[in-house]
Image (cartoon, rainbow, N blue to C red):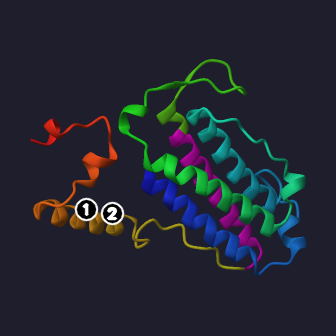
């Protein structure tokens, strides 16, 4: 799932850069579908991602209001700030966390953490599709939504190759040292 969150962040950054070519009036103009305008949709994506993941992590939701972030720069800064918090949390995600029950204040009944995380991922993809339609209505080519050739898998492969090289030379095993629940007996 980390790859898909990284994909969302990468595509979001491209959309935020893409928006720089439009005047504020076009970014703030009401659109058919979505949550209103291009800016409101980008804000919504950032806010929803953080709110849901904060619920999984047990953090308090900041509940920012759009009126406080109604500019491209403000939304970009909010996205960057939230990402700095979310990335280390996502890097620590383990598959066994998928079925941890989570109660969110805006719904009744528990949800599974993995279900929420997957919802967050597809929620942004859905809104990126809306942005793509609006971009074409403006007569401008939207950023690519393609996952392929973004390099997410290749970077991980390179890290794994480096890890194997280090451990085969008798170097420090970062995986064991990074996870206190694993003991040296697990690796013998």
Q: Please give left or right for residue 164 compared with residue 55 in the image.
A: left
Q: Which is more toward the observer, 69 or 92?
A: 92
- Check whether the beta carbons of the residues at disc 2 and disc 1 lie within 8 A of each other: yes
Q: Is residue 176 left or right of residue 100?
A: left
- Residue 60 disc label: none
Quarter of the C terminus within the rendering = top left
Q: Which residues are magenta?
A: 117-139
Tell me the element at label 1. Answer: helix
Relative to residue 25, is residue 124 drawn left or right? left
- The residue at 11%/62% (across/down) is 168
Alpha carbons under labels 2 and 1: distance apart: 6 Å
- Measured as percent of width and height from the top left, residue 79 is found at 68, 59
In magenta segment, residue 99: no
Residue beneath disc 2? 156
- Image point (54%, 48%), residue name: 121
Q: Residue at x 78, y 41 (%)?
A: 63
């Amino acid at each position: 799932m980390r790859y898909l969150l990284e994909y969302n962040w990468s595509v979001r950054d491209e959309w935020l850069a893409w928006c720089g070519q439009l005047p504020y009036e076009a970014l703030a103009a009401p659109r058919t579908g979505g949550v209103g305008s291009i800016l409101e949709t980008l804000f919504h994506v950032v806010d929803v991602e953080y709110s849901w993941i904060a619920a999984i992590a047990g953090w308090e939701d900041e509940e920012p209001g759009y009126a406080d972030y109604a500019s491209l720069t403000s939304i970009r800064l909010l996205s960057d700030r939230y990402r700095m918090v979310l990335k280390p949390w996502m890097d620590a995600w383990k598959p066994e966390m998928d079925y941890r029950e989570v109660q969110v204040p805006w719904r009744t009944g528990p949800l599974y953490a993995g279900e929420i995380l997957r919802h967050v991922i597809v929620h942004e993809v859905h809104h990126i599709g809306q942005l793509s339609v609006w971009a074409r209505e403006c007569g401008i080519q939207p950023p690519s939504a393609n996952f392929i050739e973004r390099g997410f898998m290749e970077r991980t492969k390179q890290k794994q190759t480096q890890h194997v090289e280090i451990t085969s030379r008798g170097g420090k095993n970062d995986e064991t040292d990074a996870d206190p629940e694993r003991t040296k007996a697990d690796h013998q």
